[in-house]
Image (tube, grey):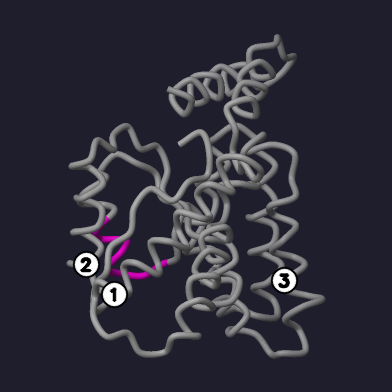
């Protein structure tokens, strides 16, 4: 989508593969099509549902969730200043080629001290670097699902006040009102990925470049698909 919006929600009793399939199929039934990228954590049921219902789309593993999982593989003394800083450097690169090059270097550096973390980072290469196949102008918006997590926290904040709901209808009324409120705010004051940003990326990629010309053409095509 061109803007951050709350498209749909569903009340389910357990977060499993079948629940996620039902949710995604509901979106498809409502007209969702041409999905290029899905950003989420590595929930096994969700991954399976994405692969089945939204086949053909790329999957970006949320870098924030991944970082939390990765840091459990190293001592606390090395988590922040050493490993987290090294991994963040992967995402700070200026081009897709540099992103992959830095990822490879970080993996090699980690093997010497933290082989388990290095192995995890290596195994997740395609999962956490899917964003680099899209225009650089939208990288920050698509390498994590932090906006969704902030929305989830707001929903939890509102529902924790109530505690126990008498029935499903009561939950739907409250959560639906929260989502409608957030949707209005995103549409008017807090656009997350606007059409103008995508168009700027398209214009930039269409300009003649001395190198990586084929990559620029590919980015332009991706922008057209994202805006469509």
In percent of width and height, residue 18 lies at: 17, 67
What range is drawn magenta here? 42-49
Looking at the image, tell me whether mark 2 or mark 3 is earlier in sequence order. Answer: 2
Q: What residue is shown at x 19% (from left), y 50% (from top)?
A: 25
Distance of label 2 from label 3 (alpha carbons): 33 Å
Q: Which residue is mark 3?
A: 84
Circle nearer the viewer, 1 or 3: 1
Q: Say which quadrant the C terminus sits in.
A: top left
**At numbered mark 3, what does the secondary structure look like: helix, strand or loop?**
helix
Mark 3 residue crowding within 10 angstroms, few (<14) / some (14–19) / many (20+): some
**At numbered mark 2, what does the secondary structure look like: helix, strand or loop?**
helix
Q: Nearer the viewer, residue 23 or 129?
A: 23
Say if mark 1 contacts mark 3, CB within 8 Å: no
Asked if residue 174 lies in the magenta stretch, the reply is: no
Q: Which residue is mark 1?
A: 15
Q: Which residue is mark 2?
A: 19
Asked if residue 45 lies in the magenta stretch, the reply is: yes
As drawn, the label of residue 106 is none
In percent of width and height, residue 158 lies at: 50, 76
In percent of width and height, residue 51 lies at: 26, 52
Task: State which quadrant residue 44 falls in.
Answer: bottom left
Q: Nearer the viewer, residue 99 or 198?
A: 198
Mark 1 residue crowding within 10 angstroms, few (<14) / some (14–19) / many (20+): few
Distance of label 1 from label 2 (alpha carbons): 6 Å
Q: Nearer the viewer, residue 82 or 191?
A: 191
In percent of width and height, residue 57 lies at: 34, 41
Distance of label 1 from label 3 (alpha carbons): 29 Å
Q: What residue is shown at x 60% (from left), y 78% (from top)?
A: 115
Is the residue 77 above or below the residue 93 in the image?
A: below
Say if mark 1 contacts mark 2, CB within 8 Å: yes
């Amino acid at each position: 989508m061109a803007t951050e919006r709350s498209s749909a929600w569903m009340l389910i009793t357990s977060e499993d593969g079948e629940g996620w399939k039902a949710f995604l199929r509901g979106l498809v039934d409502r007209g969702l099509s041409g999905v290029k990228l899905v950003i989420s954590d590595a929930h096994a049921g969700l991954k399976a549902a994405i692969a089945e219902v939204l086949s053909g789309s790329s999957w970006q593993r949320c870098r924030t969730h991944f970082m939390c999982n990765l840091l459990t593989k190293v001592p606390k003394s090395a988590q922040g200043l050493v490993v987290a800083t090294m991994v963040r450097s992967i995402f700070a690169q200026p081009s897709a080629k540099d992103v992959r090059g830095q990822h490879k270097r970080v993996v090699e550096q980690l093997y010497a001290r933290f082989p388990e973390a290095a192995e995890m980072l290596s195994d997740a290469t395609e999962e956490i670097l899917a964003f680099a196949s899209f225009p650089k102008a939208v990288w920050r918006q698509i390498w994590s699902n932090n906006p969704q997590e902030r929305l989830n926290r707001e929903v939890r904040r509102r529902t924790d006040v109530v505690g126990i709901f008498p029935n499903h209808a009561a939950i739907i009324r409250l959560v639906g009102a929260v989502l409608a409120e957030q949707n209005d705010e995103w549409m008017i004051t807090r656009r997350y990925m606007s059409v103008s940003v995508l168009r700027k990326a398209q214009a930039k990629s269409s300009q003649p470049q001395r190198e990586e010309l084929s990559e620029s053409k590919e980015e332009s095509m991706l922008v057209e698909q994202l805006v469509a």
